[in-house]
Amino acid sequence: MKYLFLWFSLLFSSLVFGAASPSTPEPRDIIFRSEERPTGNDSVSMLVITLTDKAGVGRKRGFIWYHLSGELGARDLQKFFFPRSIRNVATFNEEVKGAEDLQYLYLPAASRVRRVSSKHQTWVGSDLIYEDLQKLKLDDWDFSLVSSASEDGFPVYVIDCTAKPSSNSAYGKRRYFIRSDGTYFPSRIDFFDASNALIKRVERKDVQAYGDALYERFVNVTDFRNGHSTSLERKWVRVNTGVSVPMVSLRQMERGIELYSEPSDIMRLVDDEMSRMTE
């Protein structure tokens, strides 16, 4: 009788406690949910970049980031306002489902928009490259769950994404640390070269919610090859304000920031931030 009671106890425990522990999603699905996590229908942010060389000398840059979601893919426009030497430089990324994104650069001195020829190019002199601004094309990568861990105070899935030859990636592998609390927010990404050496790390800190969208306040990028680092501070973000389609377009890249009208107080915000920055 006692063995029968023990059997029922074990069965009850497995039913109750087993049901309370949902199975871990497939690695590819975790990456998909992270890449497609809510970012709002639209958003506009001000960010300040600090570029620091191996001697510890830093240079600052400021820009406005416009984001627009859509059924065919997202559009992102970055318009620089500081320093004056790069004022009105703009970059643009148009997501293309199932193919390479379309990326463009506008240089005021050349007075024209040109297509970025390689996603391996450095993005505006930082430790990021144009590939880092794109979503991962899942069919170009293999995925494996490494472990579960903790990152920035949150439980995370640790997932390796290994590049296939079709990816044309600058990296041999990426290791994602993605929050397992249901948000699928990528707290950290480690980048490896073809010989599996760690070459770069991206960390996102001070994550805040705007409805169901999460935006980080700080991004820290470390390049282990040259001792350089890039830090980005999001000064403010406004989500779901109705940013118009023409505002996030190739034509808008060519317009001076003085002519930008979204949000309505954009120039006051730019002037206020510039008053605290030195060339």
Image (spheres, rainbow, N blue to C red):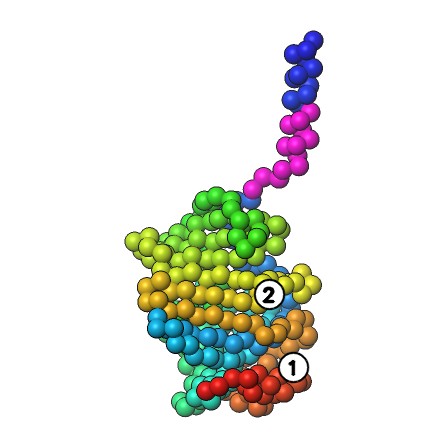
- Estimate the x, y position of residue 150 in percent, counting from the top left: 53, 49
Residue extending furthest top?
A: 1
Between the residue at mark 2 and the residue at mark 1, the CA separation in whole angstroms equals 18 Å
Q: Dot 2, how many residues are within 10 Å of its Cα: few (below 14), some (14-19), or many (20+)?
A: many
Does residue 123 show up? no
Q: Is residue 199 above or below residue 182?
A: below
* Nearer-N-terminus badge (2/1): 2
- Estimate the x, y position of residue 72 in percent, counting from the top left: 56, 66
Does residue 46 show up? yes
Identity of the residue drawn at 57% across and 53% down: 153
Identity of the residue drawn at 66% across and 85% down: 265
Range shown magenta: 12-24
Along the horizontal axis of the image, is 72 left or right of 171?
Answer: right
- Amino acid type at circle 1 is Pro
- Estimate the x, y position of residue 36 in percent, counting from the top left: 57, 59
Residue that carries the numbered disc 2 in the rendered image: 215
Along the horizontal axis of the image, is 65 left or right of 1?
Answer: left
Camera-side residue of 233 and 211: 233
Camera-side residue of 34 and 218: 218
Task: Indicate whether residue 16 is drawn in magenta.
Answer: yes
Identity of the residue drawn at 53% across and 88% down: 255
Residue that carries the numbered disc 1 in the rendered image: 263
